[in-house]
Amino acid sequence: MNVSTNVPSSGHAEPLAQRLAELRGPAPQRSLNARSLAALAANPGCHRRAVLDAAGVDKSALAARLGRPAPFGQSPFAISRGVIFEARLKADDYAALLEPLRARLGVPVDGGGAPLLVPDLLHRSGPAVRADRTAEALARAAAEPEAWTLLDHPMLRLDVAGGTAYLEPDAVVVHGGRCTVVEIKSFPVLDGGADPAKVGAAARQAAVYVLALQHAAAARAGRPLAEDSYTEQALPGSPRSSVLLVCPKDFGNRPTAVAVDVRRELATTRRQLSRLTGIGRLLAELPAGADFDLATREDGDPARSAEELTASVEAVPAAYSPDCLSTCELGFHCRARARCDDRVEQLGRGVRGELGSIRTVAQALAAAEETGADTDEAAERLAYAAALRAEALGRALVGAAR
């Protein structure tokens, strides 16, 4: 589990950090991890999520305070199962984990070659100290091509929209001057295959780690990151684009490893994160007095009423689409607002994109009716297209109402 924090990067770090802390209030800061970055990259136009994630606001608690809690995230049983499975893999000097790593990466058996090095990454220290130690260990391992090094829960840095996220993969194996990201998941691999949705989510998460390692390798070498996301830079310590998912085999606890090519997810993540607006610019557009303080007073009453929190949330533009329901804790709140405002976003990104400047369902229906004898050919085509879209919108709304 990622227990790190995200802080602003260089520049005007202190004023920005102070402003983010003011938005969050006295509540503990939630970490910006690979899972949240993958979700943010999937919807880079959502300024609301960008601000809340940068401030470290607990979006689940915020959604509950707004009156629309979301059944979002992993179940406690899945989290517990994952923790137990990873603990078994790493017990007895990583004995169970090394089995699939030997099969997939060629990690030598004890006494059969160079020993496996497992450096101390100062897990009890803060994220900045851990990230520095990880960078040192990665540089040493990359400088020794013949050595095998296992980085257990390393801490990586990644600059995102003017802030620094600290990311924690399960493991990274370094050999031959290159590294491979290893993600441990508790969902099973049955007959050589796994749930495509779960594998896809794991691939998007692993792509964030690969991107952070790419940036680190390029920075150490004094080189810019390759413009082509599908190109692997052969730099010391640079990651391979194929990651390893280590999962239970069939219905037992014996692990197996599956190689997953994340070049497509990496290209998408890199492109989408580059489109994120700097957090400083977003904060400057917030009205005075806006915050997301979820604390309670001494008498037990909330410091901010639901109405005040709603006003602060609505002051930050959102980019809702139905898939937000499975990726964002505020998805149900944003869906309710989209329905109340009759916005076309409630029907999906495809509909929203095709309708252009038409913002509401009512406007789409009105455009479909604006046909007349004096319209020219272009207008008639537009009206015909609007009529077809209005019919689709009407059917979708009827289905949603049911």
Image (tube, rainbow, N blue to C red):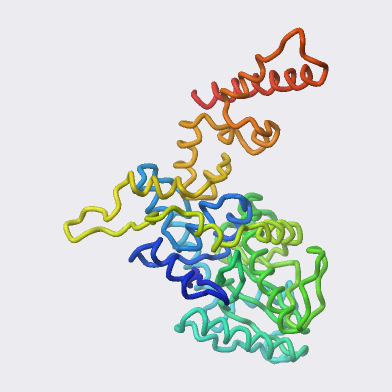
Q: Position of residue 139 (x, y in %)?
A: 69, 87
Q: Is residue 320 left or right of residue 370?
A: left
Report the residue at 22% width, 53% height from top. 301
Q: Is residue 109 above or below residue 300?
A: below
Residue 117 in percent (x, y) is at 64, 89
Percent of width and height locating residue 318:
53, 46
**Above/below status of 7 relative to 332:** below
Point out the residue furthest to the left here.
299
Camera-side residue of 149 and 186 = 149
* Total marks placed: 0
174 or 332: nearer the eye?
A: 332
Relative vertical location of residue 20 with respect to residue 361 in this rendering, above or below: below
Residue at 71% over, 13% down: 371
The answer to whether 91 is drawn above or below residue 201 in the figure is: below
- Viewed as shown, does residue 19 lie left or right of 143? left
Residue at point 57% right, 79% down?
A: 152
Along the line of sight, which residue is nearer the eye, 204 or 253? 204
